[in-house]
Amino acid sequence: MISSKGSEYFSFTVQKHDSSVKAVCFSPKKHKQQVESKAESCSPCKLRKFVPHPSERDVIWVNKNTEIDDARDTEVNFSFRKIENETAAITTTKDVTEIKVNQIVTIRGLLLFGEKKPEQVPSRPNLTKLETSLVDDHGSVPVTLWNEQINTARDGQHYEIQNIRVRQYNGQKYLSSTSETKLLPSKDRLGQLQPQVIQQAKETLKRQLQEAEVLCDRVLTVEILKYFTCVNCKKKVQSRQESPVLKCTNCNCHFLKDRSTKNTAARISIAVDGQTSWYTLFTPSIQAIVGKISTNTNENNVDQMDEEELSQVILLCKGLKFTVTPTNIITSVTFT
C-alpha cells in the first residue's frame, strides 16, 4: 500500500503467547518476502530493533533496521493459531488505484448489480462469479464476487466488505472476493452519494452485458497457459510436468494431478483499428480453431497438444471472427 506521504508499506500480524500485535512495515523490499514465507510455513521467528507505535497499543513499526530472524523451537512454548476476525485496513474507491495488486483491503459502500446475474466461469466447474460495482463518497470501483459471497450480497445495499483483494485486468484495478472476504451490512450510509456516480456505475454494468464481434485476419502473438483446477478451492494451479502431486498456492493443499481437471487457455493479441488488443480463449474456443485444421478431435485434443504445436495452429489460422465479452473473453469463434 501507499501512505499519505507516498511511502510504500504493508502490514501483518505477529502472534505472541497470549495476544498479538499489528506490524506496519515501511521496508517491503527487505522484509516482505521473508514475512510471507514465515506466514506460509507457520514457523516461529524473532523480531528485533522494531519501534513501538507512539500512540496506539499493540502496534509496532518495522523499518530497514528491524531484524527478522528464525527462532529456535525451544524459545517458543506455544503453537501457531489462526487469528480470527482479523480485518484489513479500510480504504476508499479513490485509493484503490494506488494500492498494489494482490493487497487485501476493507471498503465500505453501496453495492450495485444492475442487470448482472451470476455466471459460471468457462472451464472452471463449481465456480460462479458476479460482476458488480461499489459506490462510495469518492467514486466507484468494479467488484467481482465469487460463490459463497454471491449468496450473501443484495443489490442496492450498503456493505462493509472486509478482506477483499485488489486485482488488475487490462490495466484497470478492481476488487475480487476471496474465501476470507466478509460482507457485513453497514449502518454507516456514508455521506451524500453523488447521483451521477451511481448512474455511471449502473450504465457501466449495463454495457458489460453487451457482447461484440471482432474480425481478425491473423493473430499476432499467443501465450499458452496449461493449468489444473484445485480440487479444494477450484483455483488455477500451474502444471509441473515432473510431479504427479500439485500444490495450490491459494489454499496450500496438495492433490494428485490425475484427480484434477486439466485446462488450457490462450492469451492472444490481434490488431483492431490500428491498435493491439488482447483477448483470452478457453478450451471450447481453442478447440474450434484446432477443429478447423482437422476434424479428428482425438488426434487434436487441445489439452494433449504441447504449447509449441498449439501456438502454431493459432498463429497460422486466417480469417477469424470472434464474439467477445466486455472483459475481452472470446466466447465463440467462426471463420470468414
Image (cartoon, rainbow, N blue to C red):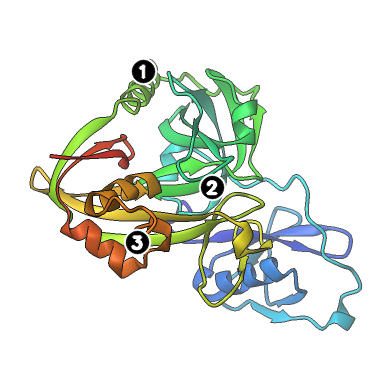
Point 45% across, 41% down: residue? 122
Q: Crowdedness of circle 2 by 10 Å Cα count: few (<14), some, many (20+)?
A: many
Residue denoted by label 1: 199
- The x, y position of residue 248, in whole percent, is 61, 61
Type of the residue with mark 3: Ile
In this orientation, which residue lies closer to the viewer: 2 or 162?
162
User: In the visual, does 52 lie left or right of 28?
Assistant: right
Type of the residue with mark 2: Arg
- The x, y position of residue 230, in whole percent, is 60, 55
Assess whether mark 2 and mark 1 are in contact (beta carbons under 8 angstroms): no
The quadrant in which the C terminus is found is top left
Residue at disc 3, secondary structure: strand
- The x, y position of residue 328, in whole percent, is 30, 41
Q: Is residue 170 visible?
A: no
Assess whether mark 1 and mark 3 are in contact (beta carbons under 8 angstroms): no
Q: Earlier in the sequence, mark 3 or mark 2?
A: 2
Point 37% across, 64% down: residue? 305
In this orientation, which residue lies closer to the viewer: 192 or 180?
180
In this orientation, which residue lies closer to the viewer: 72 or 304?
304
Q: Which mark is residue 224?
A: 3
Q: Earlier in the sequence, mark 1 or mark 2?
A: 2
Residue at disc 1, secondary structure: helix
Tell me the distance, in whole angstroms, between the alpha carbons under discs 3 and 1. 39 Å
Q: Quadrant of residue 172?
A: top left
Assess whether mark 2 and mark 3 are in contact (beta carbons under 8 angstroms): no
Q: Is residue 278 above or below residue 259?
A: above
Q: Is residue 214 above or below residue 63?
A: above
Q: Which mark is residue 165?
A: 2
